[in-house]
Every structure is written in C-alpha cells, then in structure tokens.
C-alpha cells in the first residue's frame, strides 16, 4: 500500500481555524454571545470576510432584515465579493448588497417582490446568478457544495446563551442554522427580544449552535403571504373550484393534499363547507393538509373537515387561532405553532395525494411557469411538490388509481393539478404557444428555461371550461388535444377540434362541467362559506387577528 | 354565512388532553423527567395506551434497544394493538412485539436482518403491514396521516432537563422527536448516560422537546453497517470499479455523489487514490460526497480527493477520525460528527450528480430490487436517491450532459447507476426475466411489487462486461438491447444479438472495457489503496478504530 509518509502534509481544520480567528476578532464587539445593537456593524465587519459564502435568512415570509440592512450598510472596502445564499430575495437591501459592491454572486430559490429589479441587475452584470432552485434543493446544497461561512438568521426570542424561540414562523431557520453550526460557519441571529432563559416559551434551536445574538431594532419583517381576502374571489374562481371539487377531489378521493397560494385554491377552501358539504364529501376528502395556516381554511376547519395541517411557516394573525386548535395544527408543548419548511416540503412531496396550484402561463404541453416577461421570479416550493416523486413507495387509493405500467414497472402516481383561468385580468391568455420563460432564460444566460412545473408531471389541468385528465393520455397528441379542449379561445385552445374533443370526452380524457354535474348557474359568491375577512374572523370566534391592511373596520 | 352558533361543539385539544393525562399517570414513575431504570416498564405501561401509534427508533444503524426490549416485555393485557412506525426493523424484539400481541400493525422502511422472519409473520397474519417506505417518506407521513402518540428514541448523553447529545449517530432522532414533540406525542428517550448539563458536549435536541429520559442498561446497539473489509474485494469488483471510473465518473465528470453500501462501491473508493490518480482525475471528480463515514473512504480522503462528506449517520470506529478531519466532515463546535438522515437524504436526492449502488436482481427493463425469494427487506434510502428528481432546477455539467427534451421541456437528468456482477456467488444470475419482488409482493398482498429502483430512472448499468448507457436509448427496445449486451450469459444477457450489440457500441449505448481503454489484465488487488482493515488503520494514522469483529491483530 501507499504509506502515509509519502503523502503531502495537509491541513484538515482550515474552516475551524478560520472560524476561531473570526470569533477572536468579534470578541471586542460583544458580551459573551450578545452583541449590542450599536455594535452589530462593527461585528459584521470583523466576522464576515471578503469572498465569504453567506446564507441570509430571507424566507418565504420572515426576513432577517435587521441583519440584512446592517450588512448592506457595511463598508465595501472591508466586505466584498460575497456569495449570497438567500431562499427568498424579498427585501430591497438584498439587492442593495450587490449595487453597493458588497456581494457579487447569488444563489436563490424565489424572488417574488424583487423579480423585476433582479432581472435588470442580472442584465447589467451587477448580480451573477449561480442558480435558481426549489427551496429544499438550495438547502441541500448547503450540505454539499455550498456550505456557508456565515449564516444570518432571525428568531422571535433568544436568551443570552443563544437558545432560540422562533415562534410560529420557524420556516427555514433550523436547517440553515444546522448548515452553519455543523461545518464551522459563524451563526449570527437577530431576535425580536433577548430574554432570560426561563422566559423562553420553548427552545427551537439550541444555544450551542449559535455564536452571536443581537436584539433587532424592530421585530423582523413578516409578510402575510397566504392571506386572501374572500371579497376578491369572483364567479370564475368559484366555478373552477366547483369543477375541481367534483372532477378531481371527489373523483379521486383525495385525502391528503397541498394547496398552492392564490385565489383559485382559496375558493376551493371556502367551498368545502358549502358545496362540498352538499355533496356529502366531509370525512371522505381533504382531511390531511400540508400548507401554511391560510385564513381561508378557517371555515373548513371549524366545520370539521380538517384532521391535520402541517405548515411550512406561520401566517400573520393566525397564531392565536392555531394555538387554540392543537388537534389540527402542529404546536409545541408551550402551545404555539412550530413550522418547518424542510419537513413541510418533504411532507408535500412524499406524503400527500395531491399538489394543486395556480399557474400564470401554461404551454400546449402543459409546462407552466410564473416567470413572465422581464420578471425573474424563481421557483419556491412548487417544483418539489409539483412533480411525481419516483421515490414514493407507499400507496393510497388516489395514488393507485393513477397507476400505470405492467409487472415490476407498475407504479402509482401523484396528482399534480394545474388550476388556471383561460384568461387573466386584462384579457391576457394563460395558455400560450411558448412560455415567456424560454426567452427570459435565454436573456439571463440560464442553461435551461426556468420552468416551474413540467408538463409530463402534470396529471390534470382545471379551467372554467372543464378538466383535462392528462394522466389518461396514451400519446403526446392526446395530451395536447385534451389540454386544448379546456383552454378556451386562447392560442392553445383555438387548436381544439370539436369532433376530437367529443371523442376525448367519451374516453374520459376531458370533462366539461355538465359531464361532472356541475351546475354553472350556481357558481356565484353565495356559495362561499366566508365572503370577507370579517366573516373569517367571525368563523374563528374572534381568534383570527388579521393584519391591519386586511381590516376595514 | 353560516354562523358559528349553528355548528356542533367540537373538542380541539384531544391529543393535548390525552398527553397531559399520560404524563399525570407517568409522574409516579419518574423524578422530573428522569425515569429510574427499574421503573421504565411501569412507566411504559402507564404512558403507552392500547391502539397507540408508536414511533420506535430503529434506525439504519443505532437502535433504541433498551426501550424496545422493555416495551416487548410489557403486559399485552395492558398494552396492545399498537401501530408501530419503525424505520429499520433490525432487532428481534421489534418482531417479538407482534408475536407477544403488543403490536399488530407495522409501517417500516427497511428490514434487513429481520427480512425472512418478517415475511413469515406477514404470511401467518401476525404482522399487518401498512406500507414499506423509503426513509424520508415514512418520516413525512408522521407529519401528515401517521402522527405518533408516543416516540421512543435514543441518545448518547442526556441531562436531567432532557437536553440530548446524540454523538455522531444523530440519524433519525431529531426528525422523529419533532414529530412527537410538536403534535402532543409523548417523547421518551434512552441515553447511554445521564450527565450534568455542563457535561453535554453540545445539544442536538432541546430538552423542551423531551418528556422522559432513562439511562439505558447498556449503550445503545450500533451496527457497523458501512464497514467493508478490503480483503473481501476480488478481481471482479476491481474490474467493475475500473469500468465505472472510466465509463461513468470520468466520462461525465461526476463531482458530487452518493455511494450505496457494499463491496462494489468500496472497490471504487479504494481505486481512486491509485487508478484514479493515474488517470489524473483528482480534483476533477468525486469531490463532494453524501455518505456515512465509510472506512474505505480513508485513503481517498488522505490523498486529497475529498472536499466534503455529509453523513446520514456515523460509523463505528470512525468517530476519532472524523473529528480529526473537520474540513471534510460536518462536525459540531464540540468537535464531534453530527449526522442527519433527512438532510442527508435531501442532499442525496437534490444536490448530487450521481447515485450509484449495487443491486441483487435486475430485470430486462433495468428494474431492480433487493427483495428476493422469501425476504421482505424493504427499501431504505435507495428509492429517494436512486431516481431522477423532477423537482431539481439547478444545473451541473454532469446533469446537463444527460439533458433531453426541446424548448421548455428540456431538462437535465441525474445519473442513477446500477452496479452489479452478472452472476452472484453460487452462480446465481443477477439479471433475471422477472424480479422475485413481483411474486413476493403478490404473496404479501402488496398493491404493487416492491421494486427498489425503477428501470426508467436508471441512466447507466455497469457490470464486469461493460457499461450500458441507458439514458441514450431512444426506445424501450434500445434500452433492453443495451442492457442485454452487458448482462453476460444470464437469462437477460443470452437475448443479446452480436450484430445488434456492435451497432449499439458504435452508437455509444454500450461500451466494453476495450472501448473505455480499461486494461482488464490490471484488474487485481494490487490496485487497491488498502488491502485490509489494518491498511485502513495505517492510512488513518491510527485514528480509525475498527470494531473488534474487524480486527485480527
């Protein structure tokens, strides 16, 4: 064998040594683990080094905005060339980091509110994009080829030993903390308050994972991303919801599911206690949910539809309600919600019958994307939950019903349902010849178009015209024709041939409302279990406390 | 709207109330959270209730065996009809629970050592199987339709407040603890020792998640599952390893990867510092790994091949070595390894270029399974990592090289490589007309055959005859012919037609050793960087401490 003596000397603790050195220079700016508010910038300028890979907690909802604002205010002479890992690029200072020359490279999952500006900054070379990921894929890389040198996190409460209470919005914090704490990254946390150990309701992240805590100048920013005001739900959404409930939920006995964000699925949530009840579906469908605490779920919960909800994050105003419904929500011994995006994504990928979500654009092959002209919005969680996971091995009736293949190759299939109106506001067609994503991808120099959900993973498409049962198609031509049949007078829908559509209806690849016994004349707002935020508050017995922007009383 | 007054009264805290009642009756058998060893059976008989869903930590390696032995010893008059969730059914008492009438239903992921007995117990109706899962799928269901009422876990050290130090084998503990602690399950933990808080090296799981700790009668059982003695690696494994390195690793520039368990991949690990070095591949391939601390990785690590290893669990004897190589392994601030099966599976699913693993049986469509006649062995992690994850959105050169599709439908593909000899010991063919799994599945009443990895997810098959590049096949017939070409004189291989095979070689769907410039005459043990466990110890500079069964000195 080759002997050890012939090998070159190698250092095995470069990360550990570097961290120790950072902590040494940081020591002048803290008291134990506690950083005084006025010293944060000094601390960052000593602890963060040029070229560092920095994971900054920008989540779907909560934002470590005191840390991001302070980092963006640092001296670019001292801190520069940072490689940022940010799940959700949501804050203007996330991009200020690049404009100020502090950061150069960005790996992300989602960029909703900043999607236009990010496209511009990529275009002019200010931001170099590593890749746009689905959430769990970005975290996964923190344990493989993108381990962070510094992680910047946020919590509700911390004690002086660094023990953290996240409150309901646990979200991504434990996972990013783990990536930092267990590979010699420096872990810095902003907390809304620093309290005595005995005042922590529970510990979500142990203090031995945390290097520094700082009391933020104001509570971390939290966006009520999953709140939909029922007043904005119109008859088209209600008709689609009726079609979805009969044509998908009831037909396949969908017991466990994830709902994407938006008014389309909010309409379904509000129709379960009315239309669903009339159909006798309570207890048969939609019992186990993986989703944030949507306020529009309250009537279904109160009506006894829902056995459990596991959440990726919390939702503003829903904390008292969730705490009062511990059989449904996953709460800690302290009584408050705990969420976890990784476990939620895992549950939404592997443990549910169905993913259903809205799409901005769908092409003739059922590929869909939320990337439209000039917006680089990213993916979030949809790619992970919106595909058929070939690693699944347990069966449920819904999954088995979509089974295909023979012998050893036979397996079930997840329901991946795209829900969309044929046209959006302003007469913009949803169904298009070519996704804008194809051009956006080219312009941004991406190796592949930024498609959110691939057509071959989509089992059903639901519009106000009906349902296309794509999973039943034996050929690509069948798939395209079935999709065209429910795409209205969009460019894709105009391809539909009436006789062909009749054949597809006979074969069960297409169903129109009359085929599903959906009475379109009933599709109006009187079917909604709640027609306003005020109604939701009443349903909750006053436990739901909507954020001020959703109140008009 | 429907008003709240018209709704039936509903209890929302049945789980919370039930837990409080359990803790009340448990209080007589503990001092705070600490249960005296002699009182554990009394505690379990008071806290566990008939019909409970109980998650018992049976991991891939570590076992909560004091808890499982004590539970199996309980009075079936008091505790019965349990629904057990056990990742890895590895201990005889896991099945004693069923024979003694304490448990009736089992959801599992893997049953290696108990696979024959479990098949018998299913056959005679003693065990009712819910489903056999891949690991993460079983955990995912704990947050959806299978929330546990009681979880039984193990740790290295605990303090009296329930704070846990897992040591290197963190494995599944944090995830199962989270499922229990955050939905009013009772969390009971055995620790090798209960120590003062200041003696905990670090906190892996916060005490506020834990209800009871008990000092075990002996350290938890830990199987050295990933240790392969190089003495048992023969020329056929070495030839396959050479073929794999040239035909897959080098050709596709595989930078990040997972290796399955077994001598086939161990041979590759031991050829990197010799054969791989000769080929000039160091620094170009195999830099980022997701795998347990395989002792056979030591020479590659010491030779500077490996940038990082993220682990699902630890490995007996490897703790000092991993602690001394913090740049490579993910260690805590205390210096010892932390692992995490969920994050490891996530990394192995989404963040690596390649999964490569051995198969016991492969059919003509490249479906494979470790389930063979009379053994219900389950799946473990392979289905999750051994499929092409359609939710992946970032690119690497290897992933992009396998891209297919046009326009918006174009996407890359994960390398999923099956590695197998054409025949196993005793002249048993690996390549068969029909997987035993098809019959085993029927006999066990499973809705689908228990296939480990589906053929359409397999991109390459490597045998001692060569490589089948299945991802290049344009038709099912091409796939079958390419596979047959490297399947030797097995039932599948005998189908191969010589002229057809020549055409496939020309088109690059098949490569024989000479096509890859692999000199078969060099395939012998002199190529191994280490030829014994003793060699591995020497490579480690004495840091690797093999378990006694692997020592003969």
Image (cartoon, coloured by chain):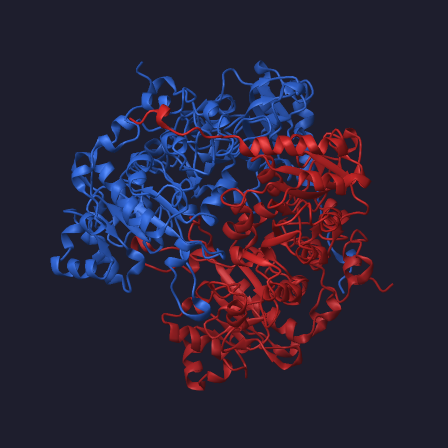
Chain colours: A red, B blue
Q: Residue at x 65, y 25 (%)?
A: B162
Please tell me which residue lies in front, B526 or B463. B526
Is A75 displayed left or right of B458 in the figure?
Answer: right
Q: Residue furthest front?
A: A77
In this rendering, the answer to whether A314 lies above or below B39 is below
Please tell me which residue lies in front, A232 or A397. A232
Q: Residue furthest right?
A: A553
The x, y position of residue A104, in whole percent, is 61, 54
Is A343 displayed left or right of B291 in the figure?
Answer: right
Q: Quadrant of the C terminus of chain B?
A: top left
The x, y position of residue A429, in whole percent, is 58, 79
Residue A260 in which image quadrant: bottom right
In this rendering, the answer to whether A320 lies above or below B185 is below
The x, y position of residue A224, in whole percent, is 73, 57
Is B491 displayed left or right of B310 in the figure?
Answer: left
The x, y position of residue B464, in whole percent, is 21, 43
Please tell me which residue lies in front, B11 or A214. A214
How many labels, in total?
Answer: 0
Q: Residue furthest left?
A: B498
In this rendering, the answer to whether B203 lies above or below A551 is above
Please tell me which residue lies in front, A62 or A255. A62
Q: Residue at x 24, y 61 (%)?
A: B478
In the rendered image, is residue B444 in sight?
no
In the rendered image, is residue A325 in sight?
yes
In this rendering, the answer to whether A335 lies above or below A495 is above
Q: Quadrant of the N terminus of chain B?
A: bottom right
């Amino acid at each position: 064998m080759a002997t050890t003596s012939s090998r070159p000397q190698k250092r095995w603790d470069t990360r550990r040594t570097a961290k120790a050195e950072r902590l040494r220079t940081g020591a002048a700016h803290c008291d134990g683990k506690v950083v005084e508010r006025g010293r944060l910038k000094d601390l960052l300028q000593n602890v963060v080094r040029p070229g560092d890979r920095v994971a900054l907690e920008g989540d779907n909802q909560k934002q470590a905005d005191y840390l991001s604002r302070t980092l963006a205010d640092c001296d670019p002479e001292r801190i520069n060339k940072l490689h940022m890992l940010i799940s959700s690029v949501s804050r203007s200072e996330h991009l200020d980091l690049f404009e100020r020359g502090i950061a150069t490279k960005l790996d992300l999952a989602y960029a909703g509110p900043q999607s236009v500006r990010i496209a511009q900054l990529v275009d002019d070379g200010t931001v170099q994009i590593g890749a746009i990921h689905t959430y769990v894929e970005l975290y996964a890389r923190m344990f493989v080829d993108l381990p962070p040198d510094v992680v910047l996190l946020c919590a509700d409460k911390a004690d002086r030993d660094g023990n953290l209470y996240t409150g309901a919005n646990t979200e991504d914090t434990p996972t990013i903390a783990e990536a930092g704490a267990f590979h010699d990254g420096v872990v810095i946390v902003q907390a809304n308050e620093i309290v005595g150990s005995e005042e922590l309701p529970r510990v979500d992240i142990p203090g031995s994972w945390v290097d520094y805590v700082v009391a933020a100048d104001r509570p971390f920013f939290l966006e009520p991303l999953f709140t939909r005001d029922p007043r904005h739900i119109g008859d088209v959404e209600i008709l689609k919801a009726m079609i979805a409930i009969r044509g998908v939920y009831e037909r396949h006995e969908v017991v466990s599911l994830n709902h994407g964000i938006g008014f389309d699925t909010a309409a379904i949530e509000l129709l379960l206690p009315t239309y669903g009840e009339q159909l006798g579906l309570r207890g048969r469908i939609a019992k186990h949910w993986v989703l944030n605490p949507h306020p529009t779920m309250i009537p279904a919960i109160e009506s006894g539809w829902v056995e459990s909800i596991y959440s990726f994050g919390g939702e503003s105003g829903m904390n008292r309600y969730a705490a009062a419904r511990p059989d449904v929500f996953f709460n800690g011994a302290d009584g408050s919600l705990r969420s976890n995006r990784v476990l939620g994504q895992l549950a939404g990928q592997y443990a549910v019958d169905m993913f259903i979500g809205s799409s901005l654009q769908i092409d003739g092959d059922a590929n869909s994307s939320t990337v439209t002209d000039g917006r680089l919005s990213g993916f979030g969680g949809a790619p992970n939950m919106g595909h058929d996971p070939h690693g699944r091995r347990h069966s449920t009736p819904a999954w088995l019903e979509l089974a295909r293949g023979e012998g050893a190759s036979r397996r079930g299939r997840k329901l991946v349902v795209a829900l969309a109106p044929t046209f959006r506001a302003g007469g913009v067609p949803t169904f298009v010849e070519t996704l804008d994503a194809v051009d956006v991808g080219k312009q941004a120099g991406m190796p592949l178009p930024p498609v959110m959900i691939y057509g071959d993973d989509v089992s059903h498409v639901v519009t106000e015209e009906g349902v296309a049962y794509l999973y039943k198609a034996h050929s690509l031509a069948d798939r395209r024709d079935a999709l065209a049949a429910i795409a209205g007078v969009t460019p894709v829908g105009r391809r539909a041939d009436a006789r062909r559509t009749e054949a597809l209806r006979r074969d069960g690849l297409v169903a129109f409302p009359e085929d599903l016994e959906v009475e379109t004349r009933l599709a109006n707002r009187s079917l909604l279990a709640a027609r306003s935020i005020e109604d939701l508050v009443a349903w909750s017995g006053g436990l739901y406390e909507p954020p001020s922007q959703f109140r008009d009383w």
